Amino acid sequence: QLRLVESGGGVVQPGGSLRLSCEVYGGGLNRYAIGWYRQAPGKGREGASCIDLSDGSTYSPKRLEGRFTISRDKSKDTVYLQMNNLKPEDTGVYYCAATRDYGLCDYDYGMELWGKGTQVTVSA
């Protein structure tokens, strides 16, 4: 059974950067894709980026391309979300989640397991 633990959230000024980490515990990691999701106050969850752990393929929504980058460190079983040029509307709780179907990685209903989230606040 996989377990996902997020870290790296915090308070940052507009224009700043943060790197979130998702540590993945459990076996058979190459069968999974990991997605980052965020939930702004009062809103539903939306996908932020995905990575297929079997081959490293990545996907980022067009609205976040150029600012958010997903990556992995296989030696540490960790997936990262590098967030640059942060804006107040990026504020929210950021979750990592796992699915065995990379094609569903950008859809929260396709995710099988979720971490508990880490708070990101972008404010002057």
Image (cartoon, rainbow, N blue to C red):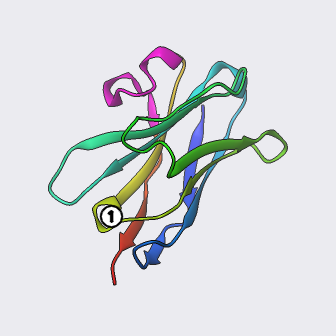
Image position, residue 112 (x, y; %) = 44, 27
Q: Within 10 Å of the Cα at label 1, are there few (<14), some (14-19), or many (20+) other Cα atoms?
A: many
Q: Along the line of sight, which residue is nearer the eye, 32 or 27? A: 32
Residue at the (36%, 72%) spot, across then down = 122
- Could you tell me which quadrant the N terminus lies in? top right
Residue projecting furthest to the right: 75
Can see residue 28?
A: no
Image position, residue 89 (x, y; %) = 28, 61
Mark 1, residue position:
91
Q: Along the line of sight, which residue is nearer the eye, 33 or 61? A: 61
- Could you tell me which quadrant the C terminus lies in? bottom left
Residue bounds of the magenta highlight: 101-113
In this view, 108 is above or below 116:
above
Image position, residue 20 (x, y; %) = 57, 58
Q: Is residue 67 magenta?
A: no
Residue at the (25%, 56%) spot, across then down = 40
